Image (spheres, rainbow, N blue to C red):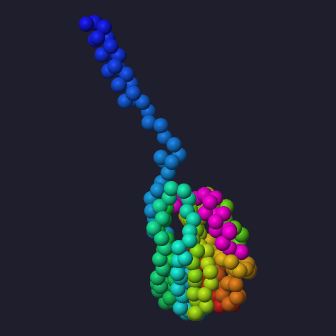
Amino acid sequence: MKESHILMMIMIITIIIAGCKKKETTDDSTLDTTEHHNYVQILPDGFNPVMTYIFSGNYSITDKQPWSGVSSSTVVISGSNALQILALAGRKGSGGPADWFKTNVSAAINSQSLTGLPDELNFAFTGTLTIDGNSYPVTLGQGHPELTTFNNWWIGGPGWTIGNDSIKTPDGKYVFFGDVNLKAMDYQFGVREK
């Protein structure tokens, strides 16, 4: 009878120890997978165009992040009709979306008017931007600059070219720019006629 008590005590202790074992975690278990409303706006400068955006359905996002698509609308900002694009997506930077962005643009600029190409993005997507009847393939992406608390945006497309702190549509009719003085919102681009 003593042996069965000892055996029973060993089994109970084993069960207690197994239940107290620290849960192992991986990078995936601590990954924030919250879906956010990510807005980017295009504001006309010196003219009042009709602008529309149609999402192509093509996108890239960091692995295991949520994605629910893209929509657009017209909003009035400072008396002008601006284009607002909304991406419902998670925010986690990685090289995958940045590499995908690079394959879809010939040139790009970010919302702080820095030309070049991003190393990491949270996500990127393509579509068609139409300004007063002129249509352009466009790629947009959201990143997160180092040592900052905000997310910024990138814009570009195939056939687009770099200007002076700006980027031009393939036909050269329109110039897009960010905020050189960093006074505007980090999710806005300006557009003016060339």
**104 in the magenta segment:** yes
Query: Residue visible at 70% across and 88% down?
Result: 171
Q: Is residue 68 above or below residue 52?
A: above
* Tag count: 0
User: Would you say residue 172 sits in the magenta stretch?
Assistant: no
Residue placed furthest toward the left: 1
Q: Position of residue 4 (x, y in %)?
A: 29, 11
- Using the rendered image of the protein, determine whether residue 36 is visible from the camera's viewpoint: yes
The residue at 64%/58% (across/down) is 95
In this view, 45 is above or below 97 = below
Report the residue at 49% width, 73% height from top.
Answer: 70
Q: Is residue 79 left or right of residue 157?
A: left
Magenta stretch, residue numbers: 91-109
Which quadrant of the structure image shows residue 155? bottom right
Quadrant where the C terminus lies?
A: bottom right
Q: Is residue 13 above or below residue 86?
A: above
Check the picture and name the quadrant holding the N terminus.
top left
Question: Does residue 114 sit above or below 191 in this rendering?
Answer: above
Nearer to the camera, 189 or 74: 74
Which of 115/20 is in front? 20
Residue 188 seen by the camera:
no
